């Protein structure tokens, strides 16, 4: 099967199995993330109490950890959930939102990244910050071109033995050896909050049906990117873009996906 | 008056009086819940600080407690708010989101359910979990047919002296003796996050204008369900469904409601 | 330049510079606030951990503090962020959501208001509550006519040496001496949650590009109000109003703004 076919097979499995995706994510992203996962066919849950995160990981198919609006109690819960995921072999994905913006945030992101995520997905600034490079993180938006982060992404992927996905105009996905480029998406998507977080959550859904991390990461970027492209065609701005994007995730079919997806191995 | 007429009279009172509905609810549901209550004509507020929940209950017409994203401090605030509601005779409604998924969650839900809510609204899995039955709760979505929860719902309603509403393809609402069935709604609504939570919040609004618990619970299921049906007709997917649903709550008139509502007493 | 021209120049600067706006805001408002700021061209971030708020203020152009869903840890973070803003001369804006509803909330709002915000924006009830007057705050919605709060607003503006903006059918903005009236907006906007919070956040964006507080406050009311008016023309209810409003913030051009804006100095 081609990469494209494998990704689509993963989407079909999400619709068939409705994997339970356990999200410990930021307050801003919760609504759009939950709606995107439901539209795609997954079953999202947002659970962060220290007393129950391990139990919840046990019944989930994947864990998504997103540090957008972190606080000490949540970071503690993230580590407990990761403990459970690692112990039981459940795949988990990390979104290091805003790494590089503050020392606290960078430190939390690095500690989590070292704990065997299947995938880390960030923008170029965040990935550079994780590697200790001069990421010029500016709040939660990226100011570095994606390519600049490629060296860091490869090193991190090798060091952590995970896949690192760098979102940008062209997305880069690497396991340290292989490199995929995804060219779906549209600039207007950067004007809708938490669509990067949504890609991370969809990565979790694809991991939850057994897709390999490299494919899950590239597939999520392609699926959300392509649905975003299609939504832009009908949108008057970022408000309607967001709504149409959710609809597109629901209606996307294999023929449309295979005709529009752009994933290439370099 | 027929049941339908009584419910509509309640909706008209919500629009006339704009009852203040105090919500201690989950992060995912807050946005759609607040917008649904405003669209219907109620006045929502989300307040959870232990230092003020009792004072806020005092100025509210109803309290909504939803455990979707619980944590110890929030559970403490829920109990303080319930203390105030019970002491002052204010009606309150419980949404035991995800009961059965973890021991912590089930325990919190049971403790709250025993504290004299006017209405408990959940899906079949959650209601079975509350009763100690073999609820196969799977995250926050239900895998049990509604009918299977009916025995539990009746028992719980009698034991707690409250109304128990079980959401499903056909919704069941019982006070332990009477049983109403509501057949509004559409399958696509399960792909929009927090619409169950929205029904719970609308139940609070109807309680807040004095509707009896049995009618408030059935009425909320019918109002949100019917508006959902109407929204689906215009929707391309769950994104546009959600938007249209809010619009329908705002524009719903008595003739449309009475023509479309399906509440029957068994 | 006229007031209108100055405001539009500020909007153009927001689009050009994408100021980083640090929000410590309520859970209900986060989604619509972030999306509105992004649509307008600003770069929003929601950051509330005590360990990082000061560092985040340092890289931001403005700080927005909104007490809608307050709790002790968040209040502590608000004060730390305000410390950093005041020390570094960064402008900050306060939204005293629900002041007057509970003693706790009123106390927190007053403590913050005394700490040199550039702008305080609330409804009439909230402003009256801040002044110790008989604000009949009813949850988070206002029951006082705007004009009734004008005396309080002037006094507070003089006492705190800041601008006080009172939202209402006609918005009032005063620095204690000058008084601007803004007559944009539409009644249906009161049925969409957190649009007042959105005005506060847009005030932060305009402060972040150097607009004077009086103009930033009036400008934000006018921009959001005018976009709301335009959105209502295409809306079927508050659900579609919200979506169109975000689109309008994105597409608004100078000619449309100058033709539709209503800011007058009294």
Image (cartoon, coloured by chain):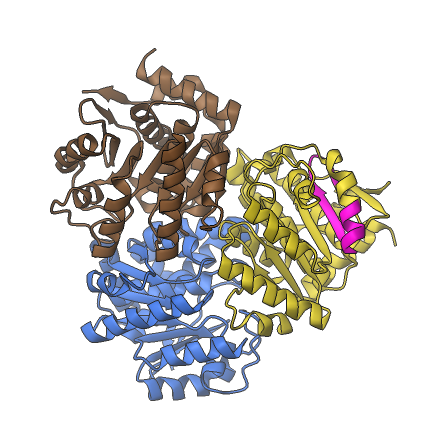
Chain colours: A yellow, B blue, C brown
Residue in front for this viewpoint, C208 or A255: C208
- Res A179 → quadrant: top right
**Residue C36's x, y, as percent?**
45, 37
Residue extending farthest to the top is C1
- Give above or below for C247 relative to C214: below
Report if residue B181 lies within the magenta region: no
Q: Position of residue B10 (x, y in %)?
A: 25, 63
| A118 over C189 or under it: above or below | below
Residue B124 visible, this angle: no
Residue A161 sits inside the magenta stretch? yes
The quadrant of the image that shows the N terminus of chain C is top left
Q: Position of residue A64 (x, y in %)?
A: 62, 59
Nearer to us in this view, C66 or A14? C66
Q: Is residue B83 left or right of residue C70?
A: left
Residue sitting at 51 percent across and 51 percent down? A69
Residue at 22% in and 54% down: C101
In the displayed structure image, the side of residue A263 where residue C266 appears, left or right: left
Residue C246, visible in the rendered structure: yes
In percent of the image, x 12 and y 44: which residue is there? Answer: C133
**Left or right of C266 on screen, residue A220:** right
Q: Position of residue A202 (x, y in %)?
A: 66, 54
Q: Quadrant of the C terminus of chain C?
A: top left
Among all residues in the image, which is located at the extreme front? C87
Magenta residues (range) = A155-171
Q: Between residue A5 and residue C103, name the one nearer to us.
A: C103
Q: Is residue A140 above or below residue B17?
A: above
Total number of numbered discs in the rendering = 0
A63 lies left or right of B142: right
Please tell me in which quadrant of the rendered image residue B179 appears: bottom left
């Amino acid at each position: 099967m081609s990469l494209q076919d494998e990704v689509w097979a993963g989407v079909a499995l999400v619709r068939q199995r409705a994997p339970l995706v356990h999200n410990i994510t930021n307050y801003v992203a919760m609504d759009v993330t939950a709606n995107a996962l439901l539209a795609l066919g997954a079953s999202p849950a947002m659970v962060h109490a220290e007393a129950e995160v391990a139990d919840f990981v046990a019944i989930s198919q994947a864990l998504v950890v997103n540090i957008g609006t972190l606080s000490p109690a949540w970071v503690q819960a993230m580590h407990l959930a990761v403990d459970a995921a690692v112990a039981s072999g459940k795949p988990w994905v990390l979104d290091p939102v805003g790494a590089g913006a503050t020392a606290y945030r960078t430190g939390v992101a690095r500690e989590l990244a070292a704990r065997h995520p299947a995938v880390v997905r960030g923008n170029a600034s965040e990935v550079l910050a994780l590697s200790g490079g001069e990421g010029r993180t500016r709040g939660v938006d990226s100011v570095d071109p994606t390519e600049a982060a490629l060296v860091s992404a490869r090193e991190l992927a090798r060091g952590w033995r995970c896949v690192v996905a760098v979102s940008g105009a062209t997305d880069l996905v690497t396991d340290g050896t292989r490199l995929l480029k995804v060219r779906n998406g549209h600039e207007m998507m950067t004007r809708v909050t938490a669509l990067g977080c949504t890609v991370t959550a969809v990565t979790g859904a694809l991991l939850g049906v057994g897709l390999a991390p490299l494919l899950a990461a590239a597939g999520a970027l392609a699926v959300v990117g392509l649905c975003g492209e299609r939504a832009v065609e009908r949108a008057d701005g970022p408000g309607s873009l967001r709504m149409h994007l959710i609809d597109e995730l629901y209606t996307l079919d294999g023929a449309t996906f295979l005709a529009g997806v752009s994933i290439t191995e370099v």
